[in-house]
Amino acid sequence: MKLETFALEDCKSLILAHRQACSSGNLAKGTALTSEILRQLKDDGISELVCAKPDLNDLHEDFAADRLARILSPEIVKFSNAATGRVNIRTEQRGIVRYERSLIRRLNEVDEAITFALVQHNQLLEAGQMAATLKIIPFFVAEAAVRAIEDILSGSPAFSFHALRPCNVALVQTRITGQSERLFTATQSVTEARLAQLGCRLVDSRICPHDREFVAVEIKLCAGAGADLILVCGGSAIMDRQDEVPQAVLLAGGQVDQLGLAVDPGNLLMLARLGQELRGCYVIGMPGCARSPKLNGLDWVLQLVLADVPLNRSELADMASGGLLMEIASRPMPRALVAEQKNENKVAAILLAAGKSHRMGRINKLLANVGGKPLVRHAAEALVATSLLPVIVVIGYEADKVASALDGLPVQLVFNPDHASGQGSSVGAGIASLDPDVTDVLIGLGDMPLVSVALMDMLIQNHVDHDGHIRSVTLPIINGKRGNPVLWGKAFFPELSTLKGDSGGRQMLDDHKAAQNLVSCSHRELLLDVDTEEALAAIKTEMEGFVIG
């Protein structure tokens, strides 16, 4: 292609390279110049134009784009008509896009005039979303370049599209001592929502003891009842093939194909299959993070299963590329699905559980057994049962032990390396981990096990109903004393993120009295924390007659 200035009389059938003003209106770049257009320009006193002229064997951008789009794409997608050298390729149903990165690179190396871009490998798309776009950069491109791409593909498209099939799913949850009914209810609710987004139904839900023989029976019952896929959410995380859930699969006549996934969150996922007598259906051991609706490795595995992609060792290992989800929203859900979940207000929770318990002597109060479970687990379970999302737990001192005490709960753990400096740095660490769309946050204490779900729901509702809540601080007042937890609007996040010392958010309250939304309460548990051995003994006594709910 030649791009140069031509005398007006030589411009017939050439392509206008730049927008041109004339008495009858502006001519857009890319306009094919006809005799009628040239007569008008001549009448306007224009004697020359910058135009594109094809070389021998050049193809017009739109013709080349149409020709390439058909060979680059599978037949089950929808093409736009080529315009300005571009063809957009959209899906006609829900599914995933797959391709080889090396092949896409080769195509784009053929000629800089031809560009072909796709969404991420294994990206989930809804019907009507764009899967790929082809753009011819100049007005003309050499036919040899088009033929070179055709030769590379050799009759196969550059990418494939795999529609998701609807599926009947069963959920088996296992119970260990001390787990509340709310945990199982919340897990089922989250699972139903996750499956519905993929066009699937939860047709069976069961709870059994965390014992391999019981789990094996439930797995076989689910498969026999017609479940196409069985999800097992263990009361304890799967750490080894000798654990209860993998062994239950073997007892049910199946095999464990993979334990562990190179996606975080979602590492502790198990993938297994039952024997042909049970239709060879998949059994997925859910990681603990799957109790939360936030994107994790289970989402990726479910999408591949429903797209009938064979899940061999290589396929699962390939998830490592882009598999770190803790810091980025890699391979997100389609915008349409996100919109269904999005609320105007997004209230998160931060539970402070990083302290050393100085006044408790050698005892880490957060790990003290209260009512059959660690003290900190009471506080975390109550937060999980509220509408708050996500629930972030800041850990520090004896972090591994505190994390183990929260095993199986849908919480996001954040480690504060500066925990010894005081509670202020833990507040800052929690605030720094919040997603940008969080509008408000409830900050609670890990040593307050008596604060009920009903109390927190009341405070949350009072806060979000308050005009200008993102610039407000909502806190309970009991007999003139400030209690916990406290809700902070987004306007205070920058200041909270810089807190130092051991006073947490208390040091900010006096500075922002005008922003305080005080809620009068008569619930003394909003004042009861555990700082001494005497307070711990009193809490244990108190909980004998107290039911969190």
Image (tube, rainbow, N blue to C red):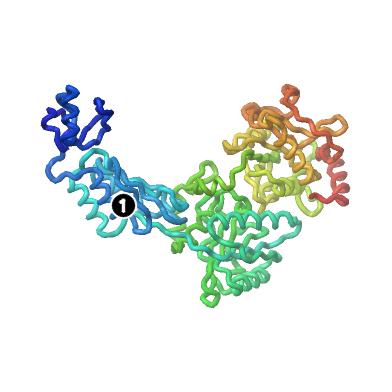
Which is more toward the observer, 437 or 11?
A: 11
Corner quadrant of residue 485: top right
Q: Residue at x 45, y 51 (%)?
A: 123
Local SS, label 1: helix
Residue 250 coordinates in the image, percent (x, y): 58, 71
- Residue at coordinates 16% horizontally, 30% vertically from top-left? 39
Q: Nearer the viewer, residue 365 or 316?
A: 316
The image shows residue 221, relative to residue 491, as above or below, that is: below
Residue position marked by numbered label 1 in the rendering: 103
User: Identity of the amino acid at label 1?
Assistant: Leu
Residue at 17% in and 25% down:
43
Residue in the foreground of this view, choosing between 97 and 321:
97
Can see residue 318? yes
Q: Count the labels in the image.
A: 1
| Image quarter hosting the N terminus | top left
Q: Is residue 392 left or right of residue 521?
A: left
Relative horizontal placement of residue 145, taking residue 333 as reference (left or right): left
Query: Residue 11: x, y in percent?
Result: 14, 33
**On screen, residue 475 above or below 452:** above
Rendered location of residue 139, percent (x, y): 23, 39
- Residue 421 visible in the shown view: no
User: Looking at the image, is 115 positioned above or below residue 506?
Assistant: below
